[in-house]
Image: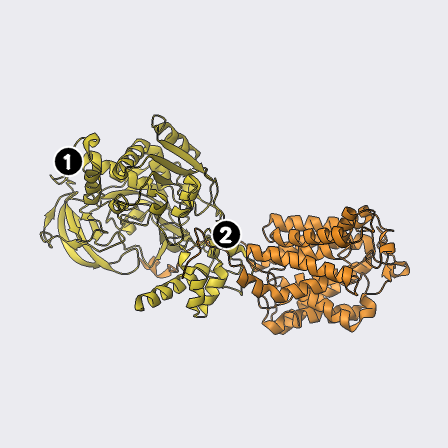
């Protein structure tokens, strides 16, 4: 019932060989962490009243939260003393309120951190609360609060949970290593999601360039009756939720709609592991696995890093950045965000730190569109990127909207493939922003 | 941290495919190589001279127009020049080649704003210009007969009629001859074999979509079989005859697929190809001219923006919205 490939997409050189075989190393506890209060989609957190400059905190202690439902609380990732509360550089570009903690070197867990009880006796409601309290967000990079996706409206029946192990972004291997090293935790997390949602089955989608991970995960689910592993064709953006759901379940998420409308909820493999450690040990999300890689990193590695660790320190751990590094990117090369400098913290959604040198980055000037239609062919949601970009460039936002600009999820395939080097997705982003602005005005 | 000064900040994606306009155009030139080689094997040195003049003129005129020193530049002028040579008789007068090739670049392309902005296929515009101006050199029933492997021969010494001139002329050429290209005709149109090899290369490189050539050739075959009168042994073979004779293969693989002047949507491409086939056959069977490829493609070029507008694909998960 499921097709093995989606239509469109591209296949860039993946460069995963740089780190694919390297086991995850635990990065040494940083002397200082800077923990932004906005690490998720939704309402930003406020520091708890008890947290001020000078307050002593323990590892795992909640330090900030928000009253909103679509939000996730934030926890101290080291034990030590709060030394500053104020705006700090943030990977999304604009400075954000952050709590700086200087480590006392003890790395002591807060007393509140203890197993919440026998997992078998937990109710769906219990699971949702644990996940929410642990501050878990989508670790694939979207950072959508995980408990929200476990709380669908009552009238929406969810029957399938899809776990995203596609890791279709070039260079990144964090999810790959997590699948190899924590397969049991992934399966346990998935079973908890199935339980919380009252779903019937789970599917773990993995691109077939990770044959070892497919094998390990198949072994891990061998005893499970309602969980399968789906080997997927290697093609970017296979990990985009609409594409992933199409190839793993055969269901088409409607335009402008959410996966839950076709009875599906999807989570990243890292999110499943984070849920497992929250449910089994009561540990909040204070660290994550990321890949520090690229031609500009001297010793690429997969690292388990505390939230709030400065990117500059991660890079130092990896032997520093090369002189001819041209771009520092948080995330992958297709959708990641270029940074002005490495003085930014690792946040919950940081899946990769990528440094690319002038050998990989070719800053070409764009030429006129030759209407080769390659962008139309690669668009995974069947848009006409060249036409939308042109409309956007000329300020014709109504036309851009008519051409379904709002369906674009900015995977960047169009700009990647364009032989004229036109910043297509960039123009479409501008168009989308203007369309939203006009909508909000009405 | 002096390094941070050098970091470039721009929005994603941060990597780009290696293809550029120049590499795409170079691939088209590579695809035309078997066609050009076949032309030289069949029509000798005169075909080579015609191609060299056409390409050199196109590149020179474009470089002068744009005041660029880089004569190859994005490669598009060379492609236009070579394609223009392909639709000429094998040994036209040199001045006709120069005027046609210059017209292709100036009237066909640059007056619209250069690469990407032209409405009509530039090479075919060049052909249309010389066709209406010096038709005596371009049409008629007297064409040079190919003299395979006689590089130095004067091919104008032996002449014959093209296969499309009249049904009774058609029968003197076998389907094998039509496929290999050992028949009178334009320099690059006679060998379906060479054109197919070029087409497969372009398809392999992802520069052409199957819809335009298949739509075009399929339509020509069907109409040829249904309305061709069955003069070539039977109806099916008459359909095949119409595909192999004249400029359909060259037009379908290299002209109608011109990126700038054809639709970008999948359905649009199919409609475009079918339209080209339809007009070609209207002209061939019911029109006064023996051949209609040039005008068929030029007419469809004009319809391209409309076709694109009416064939916007339904987006992923798209439903008919009730407003």
Residue A247 screen position, x and y as percent: 44, 41
Residues at discs 2 and 1 both on one chain: yes
Residue A75 appearing in the image: yes
User: What colour scheme was applied to this rendering of the protein?
Assistant: by chain
Distance from the alpha carbon under mark 2 to that under mark 1: 49 Å
- State left or right for residue B24 relative to residue A78: right
Closer to the eye: label 2 or 1: 2
Disc 2 is placed on an element classified as helix
**Residue B212, located in which quarter of the rendered image?**
bottom right
Task: Please state which of residues A234 and B12 is positioned toward the viewer in this rendering.
Answer: A234
For the residue labelled by badge 1, is the local secondary structure a helix, a strand or a loop? loop
- Badge 1: how crowded within 10 Å, few (<14), some, or many (20+)? some
Chain that is orange in the image = B
Q: Which residue is mark 1?
A: A114
The chain whose colour is yellow is A
Residue B19, position as x, y percentages in the image? 55, 54
Residue at mark 2: A378
Q: Quadrant of residue A318?
A: top left
């Amino acid at each position: 019932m499921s097709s093995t490939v989606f239509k469109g997409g591209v296949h860039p050189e993946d460069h995963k060989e740089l780190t694919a075989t390297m086991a995850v190393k635990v990065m040494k506890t940083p002397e200082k962490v800077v923990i932004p209060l906005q690490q998720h989609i939704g309402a930003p957190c406020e520091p708890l009243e008890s947290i001020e400059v000078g307050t002593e905190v323990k590892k795992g202690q909640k330090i900030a939260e928000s009253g909103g439902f679509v939000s996730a609380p934030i926890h101290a990732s080291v034990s030590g003393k709060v030394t500053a509360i104020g705006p700090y550089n943030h990977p999304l570009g604009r400075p954000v309120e952050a709590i700086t903690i200087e480590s006392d070197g003890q790395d002591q867990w807060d007393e509140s951190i203890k197993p919440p009880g026998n997992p078998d006796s937990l109710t769906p409601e219990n699971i949702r609360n644990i996940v929410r309290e642990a501050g878990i967000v989508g670790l694939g990079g979207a950072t959508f609060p995980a408990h929200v996706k476990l709380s669908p409206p009552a009238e929406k029946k969810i029957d399938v949970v899809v776990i995203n192990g596609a890791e279709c972004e070039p260079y990144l291997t964090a999810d790959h290593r997590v699948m190899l090293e924590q397969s049991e935790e992934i399966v346990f997390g998935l079973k908890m999601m199935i339980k919380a949602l009252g779903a019937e089955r789970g599917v773990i989608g993995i691109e077939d360039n990770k044959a070892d991970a497919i094998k390990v995960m198949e072994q891990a689910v061998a005893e499970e009756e309602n969980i399968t592993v789906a080997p997927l064709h290697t093609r970017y953006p296979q990990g985009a939720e609409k594409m992933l759901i199409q190839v793993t379940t055969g269901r088409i998420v409607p335009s402008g709609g959410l996966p839950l409308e076709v009875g599906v909820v999807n989570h990243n493999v890292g999110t499943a592991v984070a849920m497992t450690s929250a449910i089994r040990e009561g540990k909040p999300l204070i660290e994550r696995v990321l890949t520090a890689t690229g031609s500009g990193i001297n010793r690429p590695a997969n690292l388990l890093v505390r939230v709030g660790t400065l990117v500059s320190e991660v890079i130092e751990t990896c032997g520093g950045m090369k002189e001819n590094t041209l771009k520092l990117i948080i995330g992958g090369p297709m959708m990641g965000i270029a940074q002005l400098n490495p003085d930014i913290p690792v946040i919950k959604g940081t899946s990769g730190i990528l440094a690319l040198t002038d050998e990989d980055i070719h800053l070409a000037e764009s030429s006129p569109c030759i209407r080769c239609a390659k962008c139309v062919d690669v668009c995974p949601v069947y848009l006409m990127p060249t036409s939308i970009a042109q409309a956007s460039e000329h300020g014709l936002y109504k036309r851009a909207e008519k051409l379904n600009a709002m369906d674009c999820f900015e995977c960047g395939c169009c700009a990647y493939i364009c032989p004229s080097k036109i910043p297509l997705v960039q123009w479409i982003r501008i168009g989308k922003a203007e369309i939203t602005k006009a909508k909000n005005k009405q | 941290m002096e390094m941070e000064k050098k970091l470039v900040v721009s929005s994603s994606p941060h990597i780009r495919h290696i293809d550029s306009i120049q590499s795409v155009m170079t691939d088209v030139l590579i695809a035309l190589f078997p066609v050009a080689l076949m032309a030289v094997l069949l029509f000798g040195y005169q075909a080579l001279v015609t191609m060299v003049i056409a390409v050199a003129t196109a590149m020179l005129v474009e470089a002068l127009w744009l005041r660029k020193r880089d004569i190859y530049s994005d490669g598009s002028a060379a492609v236009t020049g070579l394609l223009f040579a392909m639709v000429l008789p094998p040994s036209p007068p040199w001045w006709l080649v120069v005027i046609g090739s210059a017209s292709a670049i100036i009237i066909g392309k640059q007056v619209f704003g250069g690469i990407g902005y032209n409405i009509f296929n530039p090479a075919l515009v060049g052909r249309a210009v010389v066709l209406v101006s010096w038709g005596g050199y371009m049409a008629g029933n007297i064409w040079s007969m190919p003299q395979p492997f006689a590089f130095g021969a004067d091919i104008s010494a032996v002449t014959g009629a093209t296969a499309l001139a009249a049904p009774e002329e058609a029968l003197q050429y076998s389907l094998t001859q039509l496929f290999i290209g050992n028949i009178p005709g334009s320099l690059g149109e006679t060998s379906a074999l060479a054109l197919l090899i070029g087409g497969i290369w372009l398809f392999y490189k992802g520069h052409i979509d199957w819809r335009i050539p298949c739509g075009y050739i399929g339509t020509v075959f069907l109409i040829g079989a249904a309305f061709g009168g069955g003069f070539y042994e039977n109806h099916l073979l008459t359909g095949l005859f119409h595909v192999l004779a004249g400029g359909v293969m060259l037009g379908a693989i290299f002209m109608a697929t011109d990126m700038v002047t054809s639709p970008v949507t999948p359905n649009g491409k199919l409609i475009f190809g079918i339209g080209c086939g339809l007009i070609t056959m209207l002209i061939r069977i019911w029109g006064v001219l023996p051949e209609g490829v040039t005008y068929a493609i030029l007419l469809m070029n004009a319809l391209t923006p409309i076709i694109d507008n009416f064939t916007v694909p339904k987006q992923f998960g798209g439903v008919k919205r009730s407003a």
